[in-house]
Image (cartoon, rainbow, N blue to C red):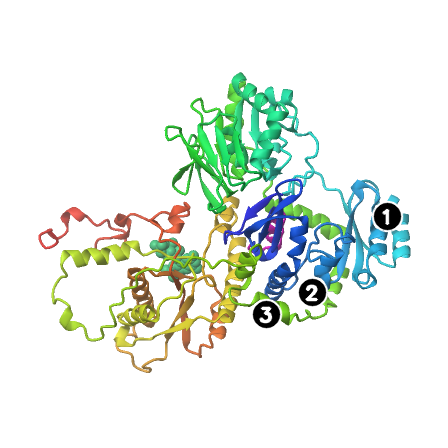
Amino acid sequence: MNSGVTPEGHEIGRAQLLQALAAGVVPSWLHNPILLKPTGEATSQVVVAGKVAGQADASTYFGLRDKLRPVVWRAFSELARRADVVLIEGAGSPAEINLARDDLVNMGLADLVDAPVLVAGDIDRGGVFAALAGTQLLLEPAQRARIQGWIINKFRGDPALLKDGLAMIEQRTLVGVRGVVPFVHDLGLDEEDGVWLERDLVRGTGEITVAALRLDRVSNSTDMDALAREPDVALHWTRDPDRVATADLVVIPGSKSTRADLADLERDGLVAAVQAAHARGAFVLGLCGGYQMLGREINDDEGVDGPPGRSRGLGLLPLVTAFARELPKVLVNTYGSDLATGERVAGYEIHQGRTVVDPLTPPLLELRGRPDGCTSADGRVMGCYLHGLLDAPGYRRALLNRVRAARGLAALAPSSQLTQSERLDRLADVLEHALDVPWIESLLERRSPLPAHPELDRIAGGPGGVDAIVRELFAPAATSAPPLARRAAVVLGVRDSPADSFPSGAFDPADRDVVRRVILARRDVRQFQSDPIPTAVLREILSLAHHAPSVGFMQPWNFVVVTSRGTRERVKDSFVRTNVAELAKIDDERRAALYAGLKLEGILESPLNVAVTCDRRRDAPFVLGRAPMPDTDLYSTCLAVENLMLAARAHGVGVGWVSLLDPALVARVLALPEGVVLVAYLCVGYPVEFRARPLLEEVGWKARAPLEGAVYAEQWGCVYDWGSGPPDARGA
Ligand SMILES: Cc1cc2nc3c(=O)[nH]c(=O)nc-3n(C[C@H](O)[C@H](O)[C@H](O)COP(=O)(O)O)c2cc1C
């Protein structure tokens, strides 16, 4: 199973990530409410609402179906509210009659939401007509009636040859064929899983032999796709020890069960083959589980990754990996650079173990300003947790050129590969020709309204919502979670007439230092904890905001405190739409990928939102000082926002300004009268962290400009000479 991470830090299948991108929406757990990741022959990790809920064998999993139904319903109804069309991809076959009773991902879901169904059959595997007719035969009459059309997929050859068969299947089933989709070669889109890796296979014919170990439990096999498309690469997905021992580059990919795969590699002589390849001078790269295998030891005494025990690794990197139940799964989109070449890299981490590297070992990468992964002293063995490492064109080419140099081959320039959105466009063009699109549109127009499921709404909307369901999924006797560490909230009380407590001149150095620290430590916050803000703290923050300067003492601001989930969901909707539209404007693919991975709001996670408005009519018609610069009322409101941010920071409360919104829509949602404008929409709450630097600086989007360029002397553009400014006597 290939999975990935959403901008909200949730794990979903790569297929769903890709589908979200194809649909132009930000990927979310709603697109994949349940993800089963097989970890052994009979067990799977069950990921619900983007988080690991537990491990289950098939019968345990089926026992959970009733508990999972409200989660699935919640995801669907939420999407239905947001989107014009929700396309459900059924998992497995629609006619898995042994599982039909408890089905909630295929025809069962179609029943739940009353959706029409199109059935696609894969003609490349053969037997497509029998599969379609057989599917219809095996379904119960009510489900049979849902099938509105057949689609033949992956057809090679002359469509004329298919004509009679299509007519016959329509006659027999009384259901129309709504498209024949040709086989598309080298589509290059992420595979849903590694099932296609059941036997050795080769991709490409280049002079550099790359051996990717075909692990039985391979995960994120998509890591190898971009490498396989390089013109000088022949990529062998293989379990052949000779092939591995003679390769130029060996890659050990991720694994769903590292120790089990490692044991199989040992048994099949592949551990020795990798060691032999290295001894011969080949390069070795381990990704995620493969990285763990390259170390000295993997300890899993609690049986988190499979049966409990310890395994000896390949010993090619000086590191040890440990699994422990209390270590949370790492799920993160991240970015940085390769330390050897400076090439930028980006991707995602999904893993459970923690790896400790010998401190004298050089790191491979720098990710978000921290060293990551490691490399051997000779530089030929490398490993890290970063999936997507090989998707970075510069890094990939630099690595291949090192391999080429070792073989005495000249370096090549980075290849230009189609971007993912270009590949999706290619597929869309094929589908547009192959499918009866007007008919599909008419099917959508005939849609019936969504059925009501008040009981499911009640369960999914209960205390704690979906999170509570997930927490209790495997623990019927719920253990109460330890209380979150409470911050000491020292509330000074509101000092409305404070003149006597303030000095008339400068504050003393310690007070000045506090002001400085608060200003420098303020950060725009997008990740919040859900703890409420004590009323007294909120009052203090808004009171200090209210003490901002304003033109003519107009005080044009109001603070609309929004806690209602419904209102916030409508604002979040506006964010999602605006964000997607912004994403579409970025041409540079790497920048777009960087942008898509950024978390830019915390509307729902924060315990409350504050909309700061400016009443432009206040004190009309005469506001002292405003007439010559009519926008000074808006500037004044911004100063209230700034006061709010600094006051909040002093209390350890974070504020995130969300401007990716449709202001007219938010004004309607908040019932703002004519003449009252929205200046700032703020998410307010205790943050997960206050970053040391602005997020946009950390990700390399933009750095803080030097003060020198911001200060001019006398006229725009004239450099201010600090040396000739007023003497320093007063500031000393
Ligand atoms: C007017 C204004 C609008 C902003 N809008 C957004 C936004 O929609 N989403 C977001 O993530 N950050 C937004 N920000 C935050 C800025 O990106 C952030 O302030 C900047 O990167 C500097 O980081 P710092 O606030 O942590 O110092 C906004 C900031 C301002 C002042």
Determine which residue is flagged by label 3.
458
- Residues in magenta, as a range: 15-26
Determine which residue is flagged by label 2.
113
Coordinates of residue 585 in the picture (x, y in percent): 52, 53
The answer to which of marks 1 and 2 sits earlier in the sequence is 2
Mark 1 packing: few (<14 Cα in 10 Å), some, or many (20+)? few
Q: How far apart are marks 3 and 2 (CA)?
A: 17 Å
In this rendering, would 14 be left or right of 698?
right
Could you tell me which secondary element the residue under label 1 belongs to?
helix
Coordinates of residue 182 in the picture (x, y in percent): 77, 44
Residue at far front of view: 477
Q: In which quarter of the image is residue 552?
A: bottom left
Q: Distance between the residues labelled 1 and 2?
A: 28 Å
User: Where on the image, by quarter, is ligand 1?
Assistant: bottom left
The answer to which of marks 1 and 3 sits earlier in the sequence is 1
Residue 210 in sight here: no
Could you tell me which secondary element the residue under label 2 belongs to?
helix
> Looking at the picture, does residue 344 appear above or below residue 454?
above
Q: Nearer the viewer, mark 1 or mark 3?
A: 3
Determine which residue is flagged by label 1.
130
Task: From the image, give the main secondary structure of the stretch colored magenta.
Answer: helix
Name the residue: 33% across, 82% down.
620
Label 1 is placed on what type of residue?
Ala
31 vs 596, nearest the viewer: 31
In this rendering, would 534 be left or right of 229?
left
Coordinates of residue 36 in the picture (x, y in percent): 63, 48
Q: Do the residues labelled 1 and 3 touch (CB within 8 Å)?
A: no
